[in-house]
Amino acid sequence: MKKIGVIGIPGKWSTETLADAIEQRTGFRLVIDMSRVSLDLSNNELNYLDADKKINLCDLDGLIIKKISAEYNPNTLDRLELLLIAQAQGVKIFSAPEKIMRLIDRLSCTVMLRKADLPMPDTIVTEDINEAIEAVKKFSSAVFKPLFSTKARGMVIIDSSKPIEQIKSEIKQFQAEHQMMYIQKKVNLPGQDLGLVFLGGQYLGTYARVNQSGTWNTTINSGGRYEKFTPSEEIISIAQRAQDLFSMDFTTVDIAETDNGPIVFEVSAFGGFQGALDGIGIKAAELYADYVLNKM
């Protein structure tokens, strides 16, 4: 019997669904909350406090990282670093921590995508207030994005139509929390953007996140809904190239159609089970569990 733990958020649907799929196939179930994991370097143990007992994760056969924290932040990278100890002792980890690290930080992901000459929204990254003001003027409408965030959390739109002092004040307010400012031209979306799902590098299908609330973004947190979508071969090819850069075991590539052609927003560090199920009818947790067991 393979002992495979699922790292995620206890009680959350995607985490529990994946743990269910692993348990059905192996008879073993362990959901791991990384806030309860401690590294003991004197013994090279990575201990998870499960109720009143400690479980050394280095004794497991495998780990699947469904979610490393509820929200992305620099501490998320620290949690991934801890898992490298288990990996070094032979524990198979899906996806590998060092691969996820490159996607947690929005800037790291962006640099990789641009180095590969993939189409992306116009972007300026700076710590300088004056450069940020010029970016707002250049873009007319600019989206200021935290380097660590998901589902549009913490993102702010600043328009050039506002008085210059108000623009400067809003930028300073953003920078008070985010020293390095990631500024992207606001793209006019056709009421939706796309999630292309990949397992082991193989394309599974595409769902659309459709805007329902009149907000500028299409995230489910902002009232969007999932629908099935059939993309062009060009969009699939772009998404394939994007995900190839990171070699994730399971991921989703976020793409939008624009008047100037498709653009890539990001490659997901974890991928979306809900979108795959509601939009495409794919039970990603079961497919992922089978994939992991085959790899092991």
Image (spheres, rainbow, N blue to C red):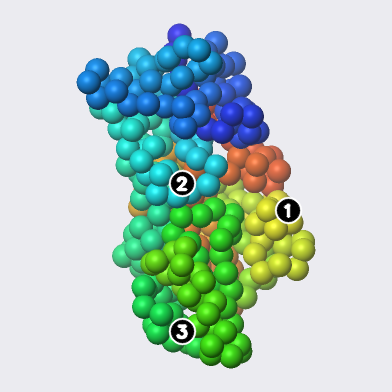
Res. 159 in view:
yes
Q: Earlier in the sequence, mark 1 or mark 2?
A: 1
Picture residue at 40% right of the left edge, 66% below the top: 179
Pointer 1 residue: 225
Picture residue at 60% right of the left edge, 40% below the top: 273
Q: Name which residue type carries label 3.
A: Ile
Local SS, label 2: loop
**Image mark count:** 3
Name the disc covering residue 269, or none.
Answer: 2
Name the disc covering residue 116, or none.
Answer: none
Q: Residue furthest left?
A: 42
Q: Earlier in the sequence, mark 3 or mark 1?
A: 3
Q: Earlier in the sequence, mark 2 or mark 3?
A: 3
Q: Name which residue type carries label 1.
A: Arg
Horizontal and vertical percent for residue 77?
37, 44
> Mark 3, residues whose alpha carbon is within 10 Å: few (<14), some, or many (≥20)?
some
- C-alpha distance separating marks 3 and 1: 34 Å
Q: Residue furthest right?
A: 213
Q: Name which residue type carries label 2.
A: Ala
Pointer 3 residue: 133
